Image (spheres, rainbow, N blue to C red):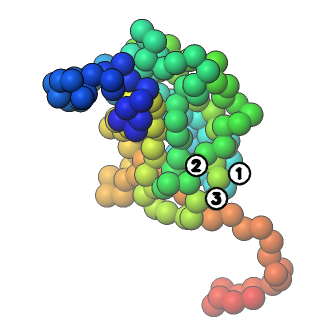
Amino acid sequence: MDNLEDTAAAGNCARNELHCQLGYRREYTPIIHDIVPNQIYRGQSIDWYINSQAVHWYGTTPDGRMPMEELSIDGYLNDWEETIEAEDRLDGYLIDRLSAVNTDQKPNRQSVPRARFITGDSYIRDSARHCNFAGDDCWNVRSHAVVEEVSANEGSVEGGQ
């Protein structure tokens, strides 16, 4: 847990150490089902398909708190300022879509997506894994470089410009 002050058990730790033990609860672990598209570029809109499980049930996520703490790829935060509001909540036990804009990560053949909620990190399901036809090159998300400008419009098959 990131902040024990947010939990009801925080005040009980000094009186009884059993109140300080944290346990894993599967129903509070969101699941990433896919990221579409899975081949991404800087500045591109992407959709995260996530089953939040019970994260937004029973008051787990307080009012006014964002539905998730972080959406990132390789540690670079996605921009969701225009697409996701603090009042938004995901349906429990259904696959929902969170839209965001990819930011400035570096090109990578196997980028690592991360969706962190108030209850912790999400689990990346096998359905979020994509492979080539031979099955020997697989990825969850692949980041590509963006060519902003070309310095010359001539070239040769041997390379160079």
The three-letter code of the residue at mark 3 reads Asp
In front of the other: 44 or 79: 79
Foreground: disc 2 or disc 3: 2
Percent coordinates x, y for residue 124 in the rendering: 36, 38
Residue 84 against residue 114 in the figure, above or below: above
Check disc 3: other Cα within 10 Å, few if <14, some if 14-19, many if 20+.
some
Residue 106 higher or lower than 84, as above or below: below
State the CA–CA distance, disc 1 to disc 2.
Answer: 12 Å
Residue that badge 2 annotates? 77
**Are there few (<14), some (14-19), or many (20+) residues within 10 Å of tag 2?**
some
Task: Examine the rendering and report whether any part of residue 94 can be seen.
Answer: no
The amino acid type, in three-letter code, at marker 1 is Gly
* Residue wearing tag 1: 43
Asked which quadrant contains residue 76, the reply is: bottom right
Q: Determine the secondary structure under disc 1.
A: loop
What is the C-alpha distance between the residues marked 3 and 1? Answer: 8 Å
Tell which circle, 2 or 3, labels the residue nearer the N-terminal end: 2
In front: mark 3 or mark 1?
3
The residue at which mark 3 appears reads as 104
Residue 56 locus on image (x, y percent):
47, 16
Q: Residues within 10 Å of mark 1 (few under 14, many from 20)?
A: some
As drawn, 117 above or below 77: above
